[in-house]
Structure formats: C-alpha cells, structure tokens
Image: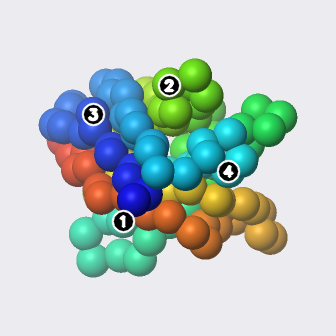
C-alpha cells in the first residue's frame, strides 16, 4: 500500500519558518520525483516544488523561489520542504506527491498523493 505521510504543518507568524516532512512507503522511492502541492482556501491546487531522486534537480514555483527549498533523503525515503520568509498568502494545505514533473514551467503530478498538512501564516 502506497503511503505518503506528511507532517510539520502549523501556525507561524509572517516572516517565520517551517519544515514539512513526508515519509513515503509502498513504492520504490528512488524511482520517482517527489514534490509538494498546496491548496489555499477557496483556490485550486498549486504545484510548489519538485525534486528528482535520480539527479537531485529541483524546480520551484515562481511564488516560492528563493524562500522554499525542497530536499530528499533517499536513505530515509523522506522528502522535505523548508519554508522561510513565510507570507500570509502561503497559508494552505500542503500535499506531498510522488511522480511530479514540470510542464510549461509548472509543477504537475500524476501518480500518488498524500494527505495534507495545514500551514497557517498570520500577518
């Protein structure tokens, strides 16, 4: 059974930092690019970041470039999202995904989705 267990969400003031973690199981972690999506209240899902477990290359949405950093630990089957300089508009439920990619400059995902973790940023 595929599982993507996200954690690390919470409440933070603007300008603060959080680190999200996603523990993966039930598939060959090294074979997939891993990533993060988010969905803000009343909005659609947005691809945030994607990292290749084959060559370590990453892609970030323009809205988070320079503030968020995605990383992956293949020994622990875990992907992370380090978020700094958080803004109120970063408030969203964040989802871990497996098999992400980049199409026309946007992060897309096609295979596995985890449950979300809520990040709330106050002004």
What's the colour scheme? rainbow
Circle nearer the N terminus (1, 3):
3
Give the side of residue 68 with respect to residue 3, left or right.
right
Give the side of residue 47 with respect to residue 56, left or right.
left
Residue 116: assigned label: none
Q: Closer to us: mark 1 or mark 3? A: 3
Badge 1 element? strand
Q: Residues within 10 Å of mark 3 (few under 14, many from 20)?
A: some
Q: CA distance from mark 3 to mark 2?
A: 16 Å
Badge 4 element? loop
Are the two marked residues, 3 and 4, in contact with CB atoms closer than 8 angstroms?
Answer: no
In percent of the image, x 21 and y 32: which residue is there? 12
Read off the residue under disc 2.
Answer: 76
Q: CA distance from mark 2 to mark 4?
A: 14 Å
Read off the residue under disc 1.
Answer: 39
Are the two marked residues, 1 and 3, in contact with CB atoms closer than 8 angstroms?
Answer: no
Are the two marked residues, 3 and 2, in contact with CB atoms closer than 8 angstroms?
Answer: no
Q: Residues within 10 Å of mark 1 (few under 14, many from 20)?
A: some
Read off the residue under disc 3.
Answer: 8
Q: Closer to us: mark 3 or mark 2? A: 2
Badge 3 element? loop
Q: Report the quarter where the C terminus lies.
A: top left
Q: CA distance from mark 1 to mark 3?
A: 16 Å
Circle nearer the N terminus (4, 1):
4
Read off the residue under disc 4.
Answer: 32
């Amino acid at each position: 059974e595929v599982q993507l267990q996200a954690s690390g969400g919470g409440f933070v003031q603007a300008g603060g930092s959080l680190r999200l973690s996603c523990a993966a199981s039930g598939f060959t972690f090294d074979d997939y690019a891993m990533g993060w999506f988010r969905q803000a209240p009343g909005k659609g899902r947005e691809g945030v970041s994607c990292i290749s477990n084959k060559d370590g290359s990453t892609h970030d949405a323009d809205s988070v470039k320079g503030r968020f950093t995605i990383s992956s630990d293949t020994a622990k089957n875990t992907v992370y999202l380090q978020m700094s300089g958080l803004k109120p508009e970063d408030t969203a439920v964040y989802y871990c995904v497996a098999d992400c990619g980049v199409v026309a400059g946007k992060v897309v995902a096609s295979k596995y989705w985890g449950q979300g973790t809520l990040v709330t940023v106050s002004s």
